Amino acid sequence: MIMEDARSLAAGTSVVVEGAQVTPGMAGVAENAVWLMPSREEQLARLEHRHPDGVHKDYVWGWELVRSQLEGTPANVVVVDGQTVEQTIMAVEQKFGATLGSCPAARTTHERRSLIRISNRQLAEQVTERLHMGRNQDHGGKAVGVFDCECAQASCTEVVELAVEQLPAALAQEPPSIVAPEHSNPT
């Protein structure tokens, strides 16, 4: 699904893909790609922090797959252990240099919120699709998705967990309807 989305974009469109859903074997290793990779220890620590009731083995398998496909390639890899979001952004900006200056960007809260809503709609489709395939039942038998906070503040890195049953109502409202509790009044 992600590769279909990426392939449907116009040539020259800038795309950031995070996670193990798109592997180097699928996307290729080229100058226009940078891979954000934690060490295995960092990956496990992050997963244990996000999922204290148990780390889902598919996440670790995905990390191992991406890492193995990057070995021995000229891939642009940024090791993200201990880095802040700002440090990671700076490292990516350094890798892409002048290319970023010609790319469209969401500079206002409204523009960021619109992009986050598009992303959250796509995530909702993925969660629903996994549910129909009999997956995504890791939270006590409930299908839950993880979504980006729609407060759209440039420094926000919060995520919001929603049950599949909550998605239609949340997405029917104008953004920001999916917000972290500490951002409940984002305007």
Image (spheres, rainbow, N blue to C red):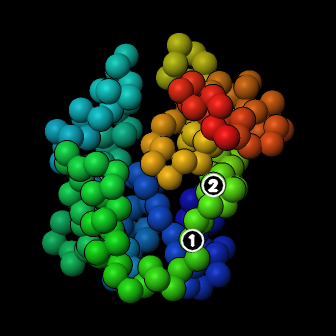
Mark 2 nearby-residue class (10 Å; few <14, some 14–19, many ≥20): some
Q: Nearer the viewer, residue 108 or 123?
A: 108
- The three-letter amino acid code for the residue at tag 1 is Ala
Viewport quadrant of the N terminus: bottom right
Would residue 123 be visible to someone looking at this image?
no
- What number is the disc on residue 46? none
Q: How many marks?
A: 2
Residue farthest along the right direction in this orientation: 172
Expressed as whole percent of the image width and height from the top left, the position of residue 184 reads 63, 28
Q: Secondary structure at mark 2?
A: helix
Expressed as whole percent of the image width and height from the top left, the position of residue 84 reads 28, 48
* Residue drawn where x is 48% and y is 37% of the image: 158
Q: Secondary structure at mark 1?
A: loop
Determine which residue is flagged by label 1: 105
Name above or below for residue 76 compared with residue 128. below
Dividing the picture into quadrants, the one containing residue 77 is bottom left
* Residue drawn where x is 24% and y is 32% of the image: 45
Viewport quadrant of the C terminus: top right
For discs 2 and 1, the disc positioned in front in the rendered view: 2
Would residue 143 be visible to someone looking at this image?
yes
* Residue drawn where x is 29% and y is 76% of the image: 95
Name above or below for residue 116 compared with residue 46. below
Q: Nearer the viewer, residue 142 or 102?
A: 102
- The three-letter amino acid code for the residue at tag 2 is Thr
- What number is the disc on residue 109? 2
* Residue drawn where x is 69% and y is 28% of the image: 164
Q: Nearer the viewer, residue 70 or 108?
A: 108
Dividing the picture into quadrants, the one containing residue 183 is top right
Q: Does 152 sit left or right of 84 as displayed?
A: right
